[in-house]
Amino acid sequence: MKRMLCALTLMLLTAAAAAQAFPTKPLRLLVPFAPGGVGDITARLVAQKMTESMGQQIIIDNRPSAGGIVATELVAKAAPDGYTLLLLNNTNAVSAAMFRKLPYDTVKDFSMVSTLGAFSLVIFVGPDSSAKTLKDLIAQAKASPGRLNIGTINIGSTQHLTAELFKSMAGVDMVHVPFNATGAVVAGLRSKTVQVAVDFLPPVLGQIKSGAVRALAVTPRNRFAVLPDIPTVAEAGVPGFEVVGWNGIAGPAKMPRAVVDRLNRELRLAVSAADVKSRFDDLGVQPNLRSPEEMREFVIAEIAKYNAVIDKARIPRQ
């Protein structure tokens, strides 16, 4: 018995020492998107800062796939030593709600570190639309049920579910039209294929500022600093409406707490750096930091929210 206790104590001391020495080799951050998008850019910005402060390189490994499943599964099944991390994001919450079976549990199979950034979604129309405000759009939709088309990227995407939530909470009947990319959504507005669209703010921010499209409302609880004159959906006629895109860092389940805490501290330092904040502003991203426990509760709440939207809109699960 005494030998067992000594062995256990030695194991715990060894694990604690290893965690304190972390990291001793490069880390890998799997990003479930192709290079160049806002998720990839924010991951690279933060990874570079963390590389500088931790003294070990964080290598970005892009693994795009439907629902982010490929990257997420790889991290879920990796060794829980802190050297393989995931850019967990709102797509993971949507996938947990949309897919009947995944090769991992989006909550139980991960050690949460912290959320990283928040991205507004935006409801927008073409520059010549007769809807000058969101209330105008809602009034038009109610006057002509089923006559207006609303465009988003792909069925089952965060954008699609946001559009369905808007339709439900605003009490309007619009026809959803899916597109493969943001550029196609904007082209759909110009060709009058759709009369209104929903997308993340960062990829259309430049077009909003140039007047190529007109923003009617943003989806978070509070107005977005980059577009201070654009009201929230809740302010503009749909009380209680709130949707935010987000990303964060997670690793495999059962990572040592000391490693999780170290990563959380380094992530906070990176996001707080002046040059990172400035670049986030340019991208339309708001810093969004949480404790590991807060991130876990947030992810659980996000999955529940999207489950409710899917059920109410009767979107077929896959």
Image (tube, grey):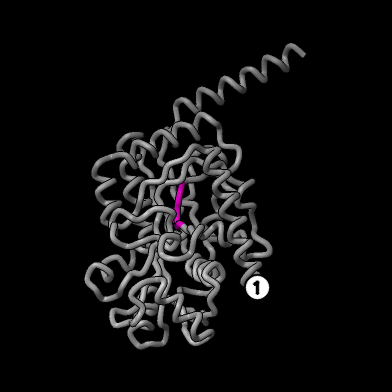
Q: Residue at x 33, y 84 (%)?
A: 190
Q: Is 29 situated above or below 160?
A: above
Q: Is residue 245 magenta?
A: yes
Q: Determine whether the residue tagged by mark 1 lies in a helix, strand or loop.
A: loop
Residue wearing tag 1? 314
Residue occupying image coordinates x 40% and y 71%: 134
Disc 1 marks a residue whose amino acid type is Arg
Horizontal placement of 5 versus 106: left or right? right
Residue 22 found in image quarter = top left
Residue 271: % across, % down:
34, 42
Q: Residue at x 29, y 65 (%)?
A: 205
Q: Depth check: give the residue in front, 280 or 217.
A: 217
**Badge 1 density bin: few <14, some 14–19, many ≥20, Cα 10 Å:** few
Residue 265 picture quarter: top left
Q: Nearer the viewer, residue 23 or 192?
A: 192
- Is residue 282 positioned above or below 159 on the image? above
Query: Magenta residues, as a range?
Result: 244-248
x and y, in percent, of residue 215 in the image: 33, 69
Q: Quadrant of the N terminus?
A: top right
